[in-house]
Amino acid sequence: MNFSSIFLIQIIVTILFSILATIFDLKKNFVPDWLNNLLLAFGLSSNLILTMVTSNVKFILASIISMLITYAISYLLWQLHLWGGGDVKLFTSIATVIPFGINIEFLNIFPLLSVYPFTFSVILNSILVSFPFLVVFTTRLIIKNKFIKDNADLLINIFNYNALRLLIKNTLNKPVKVKDLEEGMIVNKYSFNDDHVCQLIEESNGNLKVYKSKDNEFKYYFKSRSAGGITQRDVTLLKVMCAQKFISDSLCIKLGFPFTPSIMIGLIIALSYGDLMMLITKNLVLVV
C-alpha cells in the first residue's frame, strides 16, 4: 500500500465522521464525544503507522502538534462563544488525522495549500461557507415562529432597533421545561433572588455562571457561560433545584446555530480545492 492510498483512507474516514457529526448535530443538537474520540484515536494511530512504516517521525509529530495547536485556537474561539464544545473537538480530531495538506496524484487532486496548518484552512473555509447556512437557519426560524406570524409588522420595521431586538429575542429563544433539558442546550438569562442558588451553581463547577442583575426586581441571574451549552452535571443540578422549588419549572434556551454542516463542507473544499482565503487572494492578485 503506497502513501497516497493511506492518505486516501484518512480522507475518506475523516469525511465520513464529519457527515456523522453533521447528522447528530442537526438531529440531536450536539456532537457525541465518542464520535470525536474515535476519529482522534484513528488520527493518532494512522499517523503512528505511517511513522513506523517510513521510519520518519514527522507524521506522528505533525499529528500531535497540529492537534494541540488546533485545540488551543478553537478552544479560544469557543470561549468567545463562536461555536460549541463539540465543534472544538471535531476540529481537533480532523487536525489529528490530517495535519498538513495532501495532494493525491492518482485522483488528480491538487488543492491550493496555505502557509499555515491544514486545519486552519478548514476553520477559515467553515466560517466563510457558514454565512449562507446562517441566513437559511434564521429565515427558517422566523417563518416557523408563531410570534412573528402574529406580529408581521416587525418584519416591515426590521431596521428599527426595538423591533429588531424583539425579533431576535422571540426568534432565537425558546421556552423549555426543566424536565426536558438536555446536555448541550444553551440556557438564556434566568433571573432570581435566592442566594442559595448562587452557591449551588458556583459549587457545581459546570457551564452555568451567576451574574449580578441590574434589574431592581432581581438580585442575580444565571446563564450558560459559553456556546458549549450546559453539561450533564448542570442538567442534574437544574432538575434538583426545580424539584426543590428553588427555580421555576421552565426557562428559556437559545437556539444554537448548527455549525457542523459548515465544517463538513469546509473540509471537503479544503481537500479538493484548497484554502478559500488563498484562492480569493490569488484571484484578486490576478485581477489587479
Image: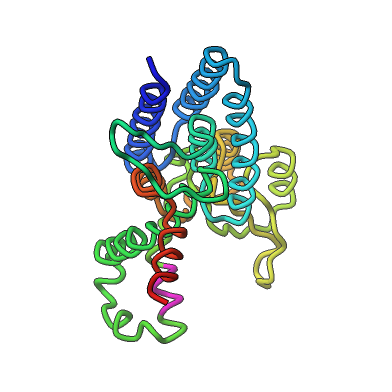
- Determine if the magenta segment contains residue 165: yes
- Determine if the magenta segment contains residue 234: no
Q: What is the x, y in percent for residue 74?
A: 58, 47
Left or right of residue 12, residue 223 in this image: right
Q: Which of 228 and 44 is in front in this view?
A: 44
Q: In which quarter of the image is the N terminus?
A: top left
Residue 109 in view of the camera: yes
Left or right of residue 131, residue 51 in this image: right
Looking at the image, residue 8 lies above or below residue 283: above
Q: What is the x, y in percent for residue 276?
A: 42, 57
Q: What is the x, y in percent for residue 35?
A: 44, 27
Q: Nearer the viewer, residue 257 or 50?
A: 50
Asked where in the image residue 219 lies, by quadrant, the reply is bottom right
User: In terms of secondary structure, what is the magenta stretch mainly?
Assistant: helix
Left or right of residue 82, residue 28 in this image: left
Residue 256 in view of the camera: no
Q: What stretch is highlighted in magenta?
A: 164-169
Tell me what residue is drawn at x 58 percent, y 50 percent: 78
Q: What is the x, y in percent for residue 240?
A: 58, 36
